[in-house]
Amino acid sequence: MSEIAQNQNSYRLEGENLKVFTFPAPILKQIAKPVTTFDQNLQQLVKDMLFTMYHAPGIGLAAPQVGSSLRLFVMDVDFDREKTLNAEGNTEWKYTNFNPRVFINPVFKQKDGELVYEEGCLSVPGIYENVKRAEHVIVEYQDVHGAKHTIEAEGTLAVCLQHENDHLDGIVFLERLSPLKRQFLTKKFLKAKKG
Ligand SMILES: [Zn+2]
């Protein structure tokens, strides 16, 4: 599926829909390795990850979730998705307000404040729970060409940066919960997964 948004923030949705690994896949427990080669393969991976994220839909996706143990994630905390019916009465999705972001080899330079936010994860579908995170963060990272950048973020963007960065360290958000909650939700998820 490929679509082009109508507005000025248009982003061409093209790529491959990658398989998203779900908890407790071993790749989700690994510490990911730094990206060292900024080549066409990396650009393709980023493109496919964005495609996969938008269509899931999700607001963030880390490389280990699609089977690549690399320190990189993509994110868009701004896009909208609207359900419409076409002339034949079939469901179509319209995407607008794209703001795709790519973070490679991210390093947290500062974390402060406290924020409780309801999180979900494409690797733990169907489970949503409040997680305590830092409210304000400063992160250094590289773009797809290897250039260095710094971002200062708060709110949803700060939460998302922390959630995705956790994936690079082999941590899913369930592990950020109290032991009791973690146990309950893990059981619930695995039971639902079994069907
Ligand atoms: Zn996640």
Image (cartoon, helix red, strand yellow):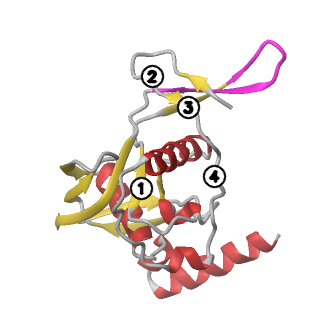
Label 3 and label 2: CA atoms lie apart by 9 Å
Q: Residue at x 67, y 72 (%)?
A: 189
Quarter holding the N terminus is top right
Q: Locate residue 143, reporting x and y percent.
A: 30, 47
Indicate the secondary structure of the residue bearing disc 4.
loop
**For the residues bearing labels 1 and 3, Cβ distance under 8 angstroms:** no
Please count the marks in the image.
Answer: 4
Q: Locate residue 24, reporting x and y percent.
A: 62, 78
Residue 73 is marked as 1
Q: Which residue is mark 4?
A: 18
- Judge whether residue 113 can be spotted in this image: no
Q: Which amino acid lies under the numbered mark 3 shown in the image of this protein?
A: Leu
Q: Which amino acid lies under the numbered mark 4 shown in the image of this protein?
A: Leu
Indicate the secondary structure of the residue bearing disc 3.
strand
User: Which portion, as a residue range, is magenta?
Assistant: 84-96
Label 3 and label 4: CA atoms lie apart by 14 Å
Q: Which residue is mark 3?
A: 13
Label 2 crowd bin: few (<14), some (14–19), many (20+), radius 10 Å: some
Label 3 crowd bin: few (<14), some (14–19), many (20+), radius 10 Å: many
Q: Locate residue 16, reporting x and y percent.
A: 63, 43
**For the residues bearing labels 3 and 2, Cβ distance under 8 angstroms:** no
Q: Which residue is mark 2?
A: 10
Quarter holding the C terminus is bottom right
Among the two numbered marks 2 and 4 on one chain, the one whose residue lies closer to the N terminus: 2
Above or below — where is 142 with respect to 54? Answer: below
**For the residues bearing labels 2 and 4, Cβ distance under 8 angstroms:** no
Instruction: State yes or no: Cβ of the residue under disc 4 lies below 8 Å from any atom of ligand 1.
Output: no
Q: Main secondary structure of the magenta part?
A: strand
Q: Nearer the viewer, residue 66 or 186?
A: 66
Label 2 and label 4: CA atoms lie apart by 22 Å
